[in-house]
Amino acid sequence: MSTSVERFDERARLRAERVGRDVVHRGELLRHPVYTRVLHWLVAIAFVLALLSGFAIYSPWLFHWLTPLFGGGPRTRLLHPWFGLVFDVAFVFQFLNWLVPMAWTGADTRWLKRIRRYTTNEDKIEPAEVGFFNGGQKVYFWAIVLSGVLFLLTGLLMWFDHVVPAWIVAVSYVVHDLAALLMLAGFIIHIYEGTAAMPGTFRAMTDGTVTEKWAWTHHPAWFRAVTGRDARAAYEREQRRQAERARTVEAWEREQDAHENTADERVP
Amino acid sequence: MSNPQTFQIQEISAHPGPVPGAGTQRAEEVCKYIDVTTCIGCKACEVACVEWNDHPFRETTFDDTYQTMPSTEWNYWNLIKFAEDARDGNLMWLMRKDQCMHCEDPGCLRACPADGAIIKYENGIVDFQQDNCIGCGYCISGCPFDIPKFNEKTKKVYKCTLCSDRVGQGLEPACIKACPTGCLHFGTKSDMVQIAGLRAKQLREVSGFADAGVYDPPSIKGTHVIYTLHDINHPERYGLPKNPVIPASYTYWKWTAKPIGLLMAGLGLLAVFFHRVSVGPKLPQPEEPPLVSEHADPVEAKRKELP
Ligand code: SF4
Ligand code: SF4
């Protein structure tokens, strides 16, 4: 990664930080700074617009009810490439922003090998080596990079179909669809993992923060890197704390019960 | 664009379910037969087409030939193509009337994703319904003859209608009416194939064109515009593809792989939903309130007992 890109990235981050704000409360960690969050939602909005208008072009006989959103069939067709372009441009910035944490490591390969255990929730907390992004997230990121490039290439060929030979357009059309299906699969999983599958995750992209608990559960190595504490030790400590608190509450409740019983006896 | 009420519709682009009124009445397949050997390149048909369809004459590019313009345009559907060819050491001038071929298996219709934007009638005419066209341009890449043309202003695609409006009223297409040499004919497909065959035979036996034949390409199940050519073995000399085919992406991909892809996306949605319902979420650990003891959970206790 060239230093000029890094410097640009750093400047953009600082500028975003001056306008926006990251508020971190006690027991929380900053996961995604303002710059990342803004980029994420730019990419997301452009993607959803491209997806909806794309559906209407992919199979109008199924999705023609989507075209009024964009002002009818021809306008849907007209706007779709522009949505795609915004998506690609916004993603280029996110790409630069995330290039370093998204680098593939041996830990990610091992993560992929135990994906079955991951999907069946076999482990309480993730293995200690799982960092800021896990293997699955990195696969999604690189899949977006691949699809983004394919989208742009084939999209341009189809956009300028009056100068491009017909057979190239015909091939582009298939490749564009394949990239879209790949994206769609990733998108479904991404939304699920970011919301219903892992409570406490969505706020990382809204407020930018997550709880420490969330961090040591899902990204132990990152937790360790930012707090200096061991994830499993923190988890076990919290477990003991919770048990202790439960015992205290129970004792208090017993005491209260006893108190109320004697009070009842005194009533004639 | 034609009024779909005029004919029996046979096929509709991207239309789910049956075609309304299909098979209710037997209709003759129509055909335009062009005898290129008697065409004199007068362009009367070009003018007739422009006039009947009320197109303004458009600007053109001079490219050192007698052709009016390099190719057909969105508002210029009928073009005589001039090709210079060699025969027996002499110049031979090939003049061919270029327009939509009204294919029996139309690539434009196969490629079009919009419901009802392209209609093929029982009589063989393939017609665009601009009201339903979304301007995606897929038809352009699906056509083996490079016929559909995009209008930058309306963002829709246009091409020859085989004068479906005239044919619907029992008239011949405008170009046929204008042709002074009688090289253009119009009638039922079987009649035209027969006349074309006879003319080819005459060319072979009487006029010394041993390779004369009829162009009605079987690779797209024939066309509703057919030609007799001096040399049927080299249609590319006239600017016609020898073996016109529809790109496989519009036959296999569109009607098999694409719906399967959508189905998989649908299944994916179901899968994540049932994952949430059965496996459940990954909560930050340890969970709060603390998990009930395993013995208090009858299902969990049972699971532990299993071998
Ligand atoms: S020649 Fe082209 S536009 Fe005409 S029917 Fe055939 S595929 Fe369609
Ligand atoms: S541009 Fe062609 S393929 Fe696209 S909707 Fe219009 S007629 Fe159909």
Image (cartoon, coloured by chain):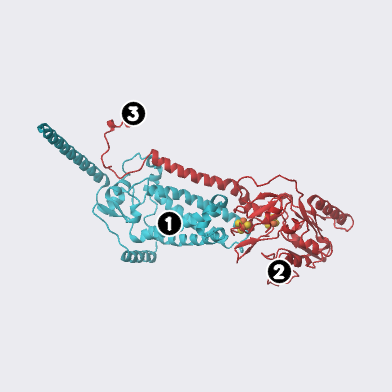
Q: Nearer the viewer, residue B166 or B244?
A: B166
The C terminus of chain B lies in quadrant: top left
Label 1 C-beta lies within 8 Å of the nearest ligand 2 atom: no
Q: Residues within 10 Å of mark 3 (few under 14, many from 20)?
A: few
Q: Secondary structure at mark 2?
A: loop
Disc 3 to disc 2: CB gap under 8 Å: no
Disc 1 to disc 2: CB gap under 8 Å: no
Name the mark on residue A44. Answer: 1
Residue pointed to by mark 3: B302
Asked whether residue A197 is in view, the answer is yes
Q: Indicate the chain coloured cyan by its letter.
A: A
Which chain is disc 3 placed on? B
Q: Indicate the chain coloured red by its letter.
A: B
Horizontally, residue B154 falls left or right of residue A81, namely right
Per the model, the C-alpha gap separating discs 1 and 3 is 45 Å
Asked whether residue A106 is in view, the answer is no
Per the model, the C-alpha gap separating discs 3 and 2 is 83 Å
Q: Nearer the viewer, residue A137 or B261?
A: B261
Does label 2 lie on the same chain as label 1? no
Residue pointed to by mark 2: B69
Does label 2 lie on the same chain as label 3? yes
Disc 1 to disc 3: CB gap under 8 Å: no
Q: Earlier in the sequence, mark 3 or mark 2?
A: 2
Which chain is disc 2 placed on? B
Under mark 3, the amino acid is Lys
Horizontally, residue B85 falls left or right of residue B247, namely right
